[in-house]
Image (cartoon, helix red, strand yellow):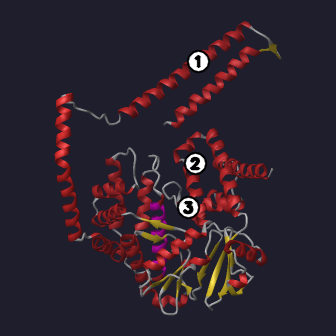
Amino acid sequence: MHVLVRLWQVNIALWGYLAWLSCVRARLIKPRLSPALRFAAMLESLGTTFVKLGQGLSLHSELLPDDYIAALQKLQDHVGPFSGDLAREEIARSLNLPLSHVFAQFDAQPLAAGSIAQVHKAVLMDGRTVIVKVRRPGIKRQVEEDVRILRWVVRSVLFALPRFRRVAPLDLIDELSRNLHKEIAFRQEAANIARFVELFRDSPTIFVPVSMQGLCSDWVLVQEMSMGRRIDDPVFLADGPRLAQNLVDAYVHQFFVAGVFHGDPHPGNLFVLSDGRICMHDFGLIGFLDQATRANLVAFMQAFVKQDGEWLLDACLDLGILSGKLDRVQHRAGLEELIQDYAHLPLRDWSFGEAFIRIARMGKGQHVRIPHHLLVLLRAVFLMESTVRKLDPEFNLLAGLFAKASTVLKEAVHPDFDELAARIKYESLISLKELPAGISRMMHRLRSEGLVLSFHHAGLDEMRNEVKHASNKISLALITLGLYIAASLLMQHSIGPRIAGMPVLAAFGYGLALWLTLRVVRSATKNE
């Protein structure tokens, strides 16, 4: 019963928004809120899963206009804390230990509360002060139910409005589900923290508080508590240029050396300690860049700086910002226009994140879906740039980020000649060892079978499938036409039993023909 009530609630909210939006666009009503703010408010009213959906959609700058992105980025969870006694029970059950055996002191009053978890302050038996992040009871079941309901609702929307298929909303829901399950699994966040602790272990500028590996589970995360102020605190204005440089250097290292980066560097997750180091918090969202992506990212930056439209287009295709069938001439012209816009700006006003968004939107309508790791990269770069400009409005991101990237990547991937020579020597020896046997097999095959040439027809299977689908559509259309004709003849000659003056067989024929017509239209629209 609860699922049905929730399904009804979600349907009413979503279809209500679509009806309201249609009235606004038809100028039948004058809205008090913009469509973007109304959409964000609708998601917020539906709770945790839908707030997270909105936050996930805010990454997709290639799909949504700026006002929707801005509204969705401001979505917050408005959820009251659950009781301290319940938090104690959850921690004891998760760790399989009484709290008195783990903490010398535990504050029942939470420091902060969200829809996924809440945070308490505690002191370990050895005197270390920690924060204890406790997952909200029942949140996993709620997320799974909401995701399932969301899929049902979206399918109903796609049935009524098939033009929305081009944005692949069900893929977005799958992405949301994967990310939500990662976010509510604190064991994964603890592993992320450990990775970044190691990455910045000897850094004089960056600090990551450790998690207590023996005290972490999917429900509970215990982490060292760090004392500091938010990086945007006015007290750091005089120290802004140094902090900006340190933050950019840290991200250059994450992007191009480590290949893993903190994906949410807004000021609420960046603190400054008393010794001047920047402390990073909240590792629920991290991104990964493999070696090929890092190299392509440097190529993108260099092409952008060199103002080479052809090179920039190739770099965008290699990265996956643009894909599918596109008009190279048209897209190159768009990229050159972008380059010219930046050519007239002071170097300190160049924005990699903004350029990334503009290029991604050039692919709109081309069935482009930017890979998730690039969406996280885009978010991280955009937030990092915003934080840097607040710290130092005169900071030159071109010199601070772009110029260093190539040098850092070159040092990171520079091959060790001895290792490379050893690999070549090994592969050569193996090849020489296997060469006689390979030649013998080839000569035996030639003697027994004669000369056989094989050809691979690229794209032939795809063309065969398209022809098959097209013939199926034509067959279905002909059957539908036949049903209309047959039903019309039955109607004309009043053949068979009648209900309310209507021949039953004719009515059935028309109904079946109408259903097949909808199938034909949906199939044609889906493959446009």
Residue 385 included in the magenta stretch of the image? yes
Disc 1, SS: helix
The residue that appears at 53% across and 35% down in the rendered structure is 525
- The residues tagged by marks 1 and 2 sit, at their Cα atoms, a distance apart of 33 Å
Q: Which residue is mark 1?
A: 481
Q: Which residue is mark 3?
A: 58
Q: Earlier in the sequence, mark 3 or mark 2?
A: 3
On residue 525, which mark appears? Answer: none
493 relative position to 408: left or right: right
- The residues tagged by marks 3 and 1 sit, at their Cα atoms, a distance apart of 46 Å
86 relative position to 195: left or right: right
Residue 32 in view here: no
- Range covered by the magenta-colored residues: 373-390
Disc 2, SS: helix
Q: Earlier in the sequence, mark 3 or mark 1?
A: 3
Q: Which residue is mark 2?
A: 170
Give how far across and how far down residue 298 sits, in percent: 32, 66
The residue that appears at 21% across and 30% down in the rendered structure is 452
Give how far across and how far down residue 131 sits, in percent: 63, 82
Residue 367 in the image: above or below residue 344: above
- The residues tagged by marks 3 and 2 sit, at their Cα atoms, a distance apart of 16 Å
